[in-house]
Amino acid sequence: MAWRAPDNLRFYIQEARLVSINLSSSQPSVDAALHALPRRYRKLRAIHPLRLALFNEHCQDWTENYVPCGSLGEEDEDKETGERFTVPCPPFYQVPSISLARADSLKRLFTWIDLLPLETVRRAVHLLYPETQAWSFASDADDPDHTIFKCITWSQLVDHDDGRHCRSAMSIFIQPPWVLSVRDLESFCKRQSFLGLSSSTPWHGRPTTPHERLWYKVWDCCITRSCPWFVVSTYTHWVFGVFSNGWTAAFVSPVYSHDSHDPSVLQLLLFWLCSSMGLPGGWVVPEVRIEPAYPSHHLTATVSDLAATDKSTYTLWTGDD
């Protein structure tokens, strides 16, 4: 007899893999260049790749420690909210498949990401942490790149004296795989430096690459929302990252395929989402020894804080700041 996902949530999150996406046989014709160019206000200076083995191990350890394997006594679908587990995991779980239209546009690609991994992770985090019920994924308004770029934020509405404001913990940036190639994503994740522009430096001095424009776009979107945690996805491939406290550096994972295992994309998403909210055991942003470019109140830690006690000689990233 097949289980419900909450009967053994840990095993489900570990074993469920995203189904292969049904892409159009002919790629849409679009202007693939993001409207993002070098600017003097942008303080990003360095990209630090996270070590694959240690990042995977941290995610696996978090799953073992914070996602229960015992039954939660819940159904796959919350009848009150409609939230449900949507990623099939045969033959162990009874989660049914969802029939989705061919992803021949960014709008339809968004539907695949929203209804499969995001809906599943939302259900999981609300089961694990009921106090997060007010948090959900919200789709941002269109921007100049709305045909090739979309932002979703994990956020909640907070009441202030001057009205209700949106508090965001993590942003998910979506580009179609026919626009953002695997090679571009791999370049995005490489160790690299960005030189600042002086008042005498022309910003149009040289052509920019797709991965540079993506970094510009991600930085701008994140700092606008005061939200340093982010994910970049084409559905077929996923990258997880976070900016430093002063917004001068970024730490970024390797590229993961949609059907990755040990950890799965669902594991990584749940781990990164919980980390962005400061929940127990999550990843902690290293302290970058550069004067902060912008005021921030986000929690920081030294690099040595990132590893378990018996692995204190290791770090998840290499290089000095």
Image (spheres, rainbow, N blue to C red):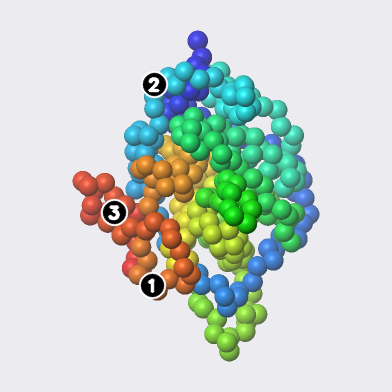
> Residue flagged by tag 3: what amino acid is it?
Asp
Image-quadrant location for residue 101: top right
- Secondary structure, mark 1, is loop
> Residue flagged by tag 1: what amino acid is it?
Ile
- Residue at image position (60%, 74%) is 38
Viewer-nearest residue: 125 or 130: 130
| Residue marked by disc 2 | 70
- The residues bearing labels 1 and 3 have C-alpha atoms spaced at a distance of 18 Å
> Residue flagged by tag 2: what amino acid is it?
Gly
Viewer-nearest residue: 204 or 301: 301
Vertical comparison of 9 with 288: above or below: above
- The residues bearing labels 3 and 2 have C-alpha atoms spaced at a distance of 30 Å
Label 3 or label 2, whichever comes before in sequence order: 2
- The residues bearing labels 1 and 2 have C-alpha atoms spaced at a distance of 45 Å
The answer to whether 213 appears left or right of 105 in the picture is left
Question: Residues at badges 1 and 2 in contact (C-beta under 8 Å)?
Answer: no
Neighbours of disc 1 within 10 Å: few (<14), some (14-19), many (20+): few
- Residue at image position (50%, 20%) is 74
| Residue marked by disc 1 | 290
Q: In the current view of this chain or complex, which residue is farthest to the top?
A: 1
Viewer-nearest residue: 161 or 153: 161
The x, y position of residue 288, in whole percent, is 37, 66
Residue 117 visible somewhere in the drawing: no
- Residue at image position (31%, 52%) is 306
Residue 169 visible somewhere in the drawing: yes
The x, y position of residue 271, in whole percent, is 44, 42
| Residue marked by disc 3 | 305
Q: In the current view of this chain or complex, which residue is farthest to the front?
A: 161
